[in-house]
Image (cartoon, rainbow, N blue to C red):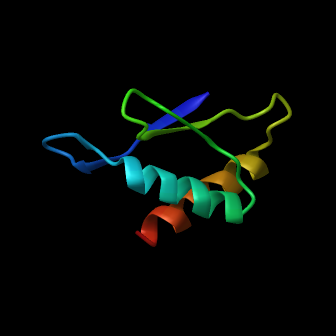
């Protein structure tokens, strides 16, 4: 499992709960299902299956890059 915590301010580490929901929705539209976690709901979780390939990892990374760059 891989967890990515989103914050609105790197110094204060303010949780980015709404932004996390937006990322989840956008990645779902791209065909990537991720979960949400963390005390503040600002961590998205990627839980790949055992048959996860390098091509799958590249696809997820590209989808994440595209989604986060649009914010």
* Residue at 73% from the left image edge and 35% from the top image edge: 48
Give the quarter of the figure containing the C terminus.
bottom left
Is residue 7 left or right of 48 when viewed as pictured?
left
Observer-nearest of 34 and 51: 34
Residue 71 versus residue 48 in the image, above or below: below
Residue 6 in picture, x, y percent from top left: 37, 45
Residue 10 in picture, x, y percent from top left: 20, 46
Is residue 44 left or right of 29 when viewed as pictured?
left
Observer-nearest of 55 and 15: 15
Residue 69 in picture, x, y percent from top left: 44, 69
**Seen from this angle, which residue lies furthest right?**
51
* Residue at 70% from the left image edge and 48% from the top image edge: 33
Observer-nearest of 51 and 71: 71
Is residue 24 left or right of 13 when viewed as pictured?
right
Residue 52 visible: yes
Residue 62 visible: no
Give the quarter of the figure containing the N terminus.
top right
* Residue at 13% from the left image edge and 43% from the top image edge: 11
**Seen from this angle, which residue lies furthest bottom?**
70
* Residue at 82% from the left image edge and 28% from the top image edge: 50
């Amino acid at each position: 499992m891989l967890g990515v915590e989103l914050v609105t301010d790197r110094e204060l580490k303010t949780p980015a709960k709404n932004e996390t929901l937006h990322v989840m929705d956008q990645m779902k539209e791209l065909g990537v299902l991720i979960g949400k976690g963390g005390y503040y709901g600002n961590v998205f979780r990627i839980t790949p299956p055992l048959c996860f390939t390098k091509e799958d990892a590249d696809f997820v990374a590209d989808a994440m890059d595209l989604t986060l760059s649009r914010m």
